[in-house]
Image (tube, coloured by chain):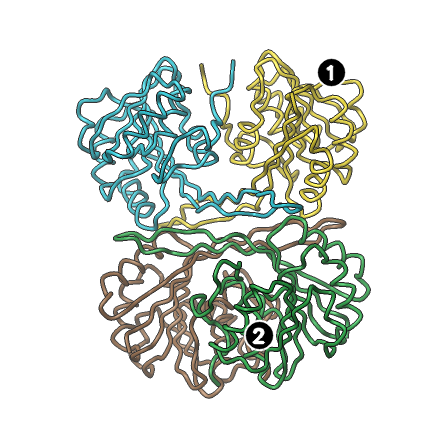
Chain colours: A yellow, B cyan, C green, D brown
């Protein structure tokens, strides 16, 4: 078994599109517990760093990267090619649009919601398989609140937990190791009842 | 492929022995990139949370948990039994004592150094295989500095990087989700030249 | 000029009532820019650490500590006596109840809102003087969101800024200095238009 | 009494010289407890944000800004003029050079040590008045360690405490409030025995 997680950030082409950093990808994908033959939706896929790393965890499954931005989709295609991720499919739509045509998911990753987080969660909850998981990454006060409130309103179907992760990197500058902060990210993980 | 990482903290018996938290285990073990047939030394293994989770990543390999405290070793045995980790061996010694008899490692995890970090790194560097990795977790000003200085003094053999990770957990208290902080942990990752 | 800020945490009696920590008090009170003769409301005053420290900044003014819990009010009285803060008055009510009888404030500190943050902000905004400031401390996803949304809905009257502060303390344990985390706190500061 | 602390970051001209951020200045200066007629040395003064804010706390005293970089000193002069801080004097030297000619300090702020932290602390300890305080800000693994070790080696003369502060700012981006991290800063505070 080779290891599937831990692609370095610099292996992704990102231009100026924001990208989920390595440590956040790792924590998100381990908490997702992706099945080897799983169907994964990655909503707001951006440059695809999460999609591509997820795809390595389900070599017998498929990851659907849903992304509205043409610019991001172009980078996504390049990254899929560079990192040889044949089991990533692209849906160039703004979720929840575009989800109808996809197979029911085992796991849903939500990295960007374009202000539609409740609509996306409604659409996802109609399709997510029993025991399935939703992972929501957020860097804003609003999205984490709205996701939490949606989960609380659906507590009969879902249980959830969450963290805020703040990572600083040691940057070697001459004789010193300086701490450089990455922005804090909230990671919510919801499990649908079996 | 089932997933190997992500054991919940509550699955480990810990009594009052400090334990590496789930998120730190995940980040440490992904950055370690443990080979499936690898030999891993876990120095300052404590209750064994890192050893046991590492052992799942090298089912054809072996993890050697080195721990000086009798109390911790007792818990380690219970956790190995509870979580069915047959490929974890215990060395009840204070490292660098006890390392001589072990096979050369592919990966070394250092979670506790008992004030001997340089001696441990010296001993490890005599035995670590080319391309091997050392992961050092630290919660003190002293250990992270001393480890960094050792690595800087051995820059011809090793390159390193590091992060400080500060995780807060959402705690659901009635209608609220409150952020509860875990202590910041430094994670250093050193790679021996191939 | 003696210095007015920076009372050590251990100077307050707190029993098991949660207390705003020194660093958060300092940041909150400096951002509040309390006038020497100002009227300050401290809503959800708890053990009074913020009220008492605020009172030192307005020796010619008055701080009104509004607190619903009998247990907290008892501690508040002890702390006021111990730390000689004659210009702190106590209102044993659950805000917004109890605010009617108070003089119009120059500054309002909100440390606890008991789920009534919008009601409190509505009541405060009817009374706060032009150019006045509101400081809101929060440790939950919900309160920071609800306060921010209220402020956004009143953007013609108020501008705001905010931080999240995460403090870790160096704890000297034998030969080591270990980082011990305090919970992250959000500090919102809103200024009413002059 | 007007309030002396809390100058906004944007009031300082900084070009590309690194500057201590507002929250760190506030915490540092409150912990320093600067006497109104105190003599303050600010070593590694950079653009002078700490010197100028300290100067407001000692209107009957004097702040000596020690800075080796010509570029920083130029900015320092502009900031002193812009913010009307007549009681800041400039020493264009690399500390510990230049300290000999200064009056004995009540407080010493060390924001930059250029790799000479022990030499600076040795020089400072020969001159600091009884009961005086040293505040050391650091963003590197090395400086915080070396300062802590020096303080531990001088524990008969000094007691110390420390924090690491990590501040994130809410950035209002359209309908969202996003957390943007500032780098973590260690703040050590040492008090000389009376």
Above or below: residue D194 compared with residue B115:
below
Badge 2 marks a residue whose secondary structure is helix
**Rendering coords of residue C31 (x, y %):** 60, 69
Decide if residue B138 is on the left or right side of residue A109.
left
Q: Which label number is shown at residue A103?
A: 1
Name the residue that disc number 2 marks: C54
Judging from the image, mark 1 belongs to the subunit labelled A
Q: Are marks 1 and 2 on the same chain?
A: no
Badge 1 marks a residue whose secondary structure is loop
Q: Which label number is shown at residue A79?
A: none
Decide if residue C72 is on the left or right side of residue C13.
right
Q: How many marks?
A: 2
Above or below: residue A185 compared with residue C34:
above
**Rendering coords of residue B66 (x, y %):** 26, 29
Per the model, the C-alpha gap separating discs 1 and 2 is 59 Å
**Rendering coords of residue B75 (x, y %):** 32, 30
Residue that appears at 48% across and 45% down: B166
Above or below: residue A100 compared with residue A114:
above
Marks 1 and 2 close (CB-CB < 8 Å) = no
Residue that appears at 36% across and 40% down: B18
The answer to which of A18 and A140 lies nearer the viewer is A140
Q: Looking at the image, is mark 1 or mark 2 nearer the viewer?
A: 2
The answer to which of D39 and D153 lies nearer the viewer is D153
The answer to which of A123 and D14 lies nearer the viewer is A123
């Amino acid at each position: 078994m080779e290891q599937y997680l831990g692609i370095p950030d610099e292996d992704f082409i990102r231009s100026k599109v924001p990208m989920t950093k390595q440590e956040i990808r790792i924590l998100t994908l381990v908490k997702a517990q992706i099945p080897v033959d799983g169907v994964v939706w990655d909503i707001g896929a951006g440059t695809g760093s999460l999609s591509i790393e997820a795809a390595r965890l389900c070599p017998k499954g498929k990851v659907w990267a849903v992304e509205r931005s043409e610019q991001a989709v172009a980078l996504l295609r390049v990254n899929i090619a560079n990192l040889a991720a044949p089991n990533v499919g692209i849906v160039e739509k703004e979720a929840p649009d575009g989800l109808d045509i996809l197979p029911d998911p085992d796991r849903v990753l939500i990295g960007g919601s374009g202000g539609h987080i409740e609509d996306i969660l409604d659409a996802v909850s109609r399709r997510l398989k029993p025991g399935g998981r939703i992972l929501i990454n957020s860097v804003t006060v609003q999205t984490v609140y709205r996701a939490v409130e949606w989960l609380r309103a659906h507590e009969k179907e879902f249980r959830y937990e969450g963290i805020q992760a703040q990572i600083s990197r040691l940057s070697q500058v001459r004789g010193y190791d300086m701490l450089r902060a990455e922005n804090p990210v909230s990671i919510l993980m919801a499990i649908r009842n079996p």
